[in-house]
Amino acid sequence: MPNCQETLKELELFLDSELPNARIEEIMVHLTGCTDCQGAFEFHAELRAIVRAKAKRDHLPDGFTDRLLACFEPQTDPD
């Protein structure tokens, strides 16, 4: 069973259905029992829905998609 850190790390892949079925089931079980991860899941799922709906209605400025994707990239510690 995944822990919170593993679940949050794979949340985007989970939302995109890009994980093996067994892993998806494990994450679903974790989400059922963990309100913190469930809240993160709901936030990301709703954010995706809002962006998707907005993108269908409005013209996106140049570079918007790149800036949006950069928001979801893991942050690295400057050494």
Image (spheres, grey):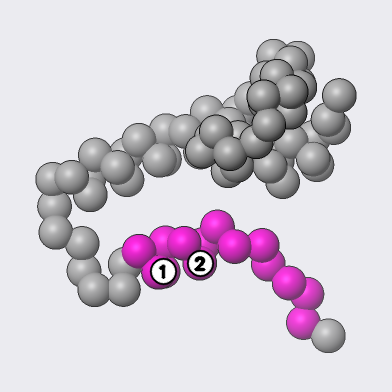
Q: Which residue is at a point 80% across and 34% down the rendered structure image?
A: 4
For residue 67, side relative to residue 70 (left or right): left
Q: Which residue is drawn at 83% across and 30% down?
A: 2
Vertical order, 31 against 67 (above or below): above
Relative to residue 23, is residue 39 drawn left or right? left
Crowd class of label 1 (few under 14; some 14 to 19; many from 20; radius 10 Å): few
Does residue 37 appear anywhere in the picture? no
Gap between marks 2 and 1 measured at Cα:
5 Å
Which of the 4 image quadrants contains residue 22? top right
Please say whether residue 69 is one of the residues in the magenta stretch: yes
Considering depth in this image, is 21 or 30 the residue closer to the camera? Answer: 21
Across and down, in percent, residue 66 comes to 40, 69
Q: Is residue 72 magenta?
A: yes
Q: Identify the residue at horizontal 51%, vertical 38% (top origin).
A: 16
Q: What residue type is labelled 1?
A: Arg
Position in image of residue 15 (x %, y %)? 53, 35
Residue 15 seen in the figure: yes
Q: Where is residue 70 in the image (x, y as percent from the top left)?
A: 50, 67
Q: SS of the residue at dot 1?
A: helix
Label 1 near label 2: C-beta < 8 Å?
Answer: yes
| Apparent side of residue 67 relative to residue 79 in the rendered image (left or right) | left
| Residue that appears at 86% across and 24% down | 1
x and y percentages locating residue 40 in the rendered image? 61, 34
Amino acid found under the numbered disc labelled 2: Ala
Q: Mark 1 points at which residue?
A: 67
Rate crowding at label 2 as few (under 14), some (14 to 19) or many (20 or more) other CA atoms within 10 Å: few
Vertical relation: 38 (above or below) 14: above
Residue picked out by circle 2: 70
Give the magenta-colored segment's residue range.
65-78
Q: In which quarter of the image is residue 26?
A: top right
Question: Circle 2 sits in a helix, a strand or a loop, which is it?
Answer: helix
